[in-house]
Amino acid sequence: VVRAKNPVHSVLFPIPVFRNTSGLLLFLGLDFFAMIFPVVHIGAIAVSFLFVVMMFNIQIAEIHEEVLRYLPVSGIIGLIFWWEMFFILDNESIPLLPTQRNTTSLRYTVYAEKVRSWTNLETLGNLLYTYYFVWFLVPSLILLVAMIGAIVLTMHRTTKVKRQDVFRRNAIDSRRTIMRRTTDPLTID
């Protein structure tokens, strides 16, 4: 995404990431989230970003910087992530801490067992429509405003372009507008 020279490609590259994330959610048993994730991210966000980038009419800029310039910083960040994944999440306890706290609770918590025995959809619907209804309505209003804005931007009409009104043209009676004239032939003296 970052190294793409064309901004349209930068918008299109996250689509496989969203698709793979949806597959991962499907493997974890979150069937509703796995089906709604591509609809929201690919269908709404990626298409709106693509629309915005194409409206800007950005010229393709060449990147002249060296890639090796970012190698030390990315290497340090990669080592930190590797250290976290290997030493913290895979071990039963962190030997660096004086209290030897157990880190197995960092893996995940199954909230479905803590709530009643509802399905994923029932739990999500109960939470969304009772406790978090404001957080459900505000994004829908934001998406509504964005959709109306996109429609207004694309329906911009200029007055400099001559257009014909098709319905007015078809409503004209051709017998009144087309006149047949007869002319006398030329006479040469």
Image (cartoon, rainbow, N blue to C red):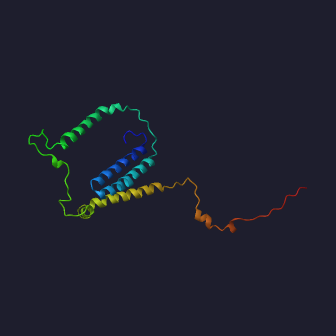
Q: Quadrant of the C terminus?
A: bottom right
Give percent across and percent down for residue 6: 43, 41
What residue is drawn where x is 29% and y is 60%? Answer: 136
- In the image, 79: left or right of 164? left
What residue is drawn where x is 20% and y is 64%? Answer: 117
- In the image, 60: left or right of 86? right
What residue is drawn where x is 45% and y is 54%? Answer: 153
In the image, residue 46 sits, relative to residue 117, either above or below, namely above
- The quarter of the picture where residue 3 lies is top left
Q: Quadrant of the N terminus?
A: top left
Identify the residue at the far front of this view.
Answer: 27
In the image, residue 177 sits, relative to residue 70, either above or below, namely below
What residue is drawn where x is 24% and y is 39%? Answer: 81
Identify the residue at the far left of this view.
Answer: 99
- The quarter of the picture where residue 119 lies is bottom left
Give percent across and percent down for residue 37: 33, 55
In the image, residue 48 sits, relative to residue 128, either above or below, namely above
Total marks drawn? 0
Identify the residue at the far right of this view.
Answer: 189
Give percent across and percent down for residue 176: 69, 68
- In the image, 178: left or right of 106? right
Return the residue nearer the eye: 143 or 109. 109
- The quarter of the picture where residue 72 lies is top left
- In the image, 179: left or right of 184? left
Give percent across and percent down for residue 111: 20, 57
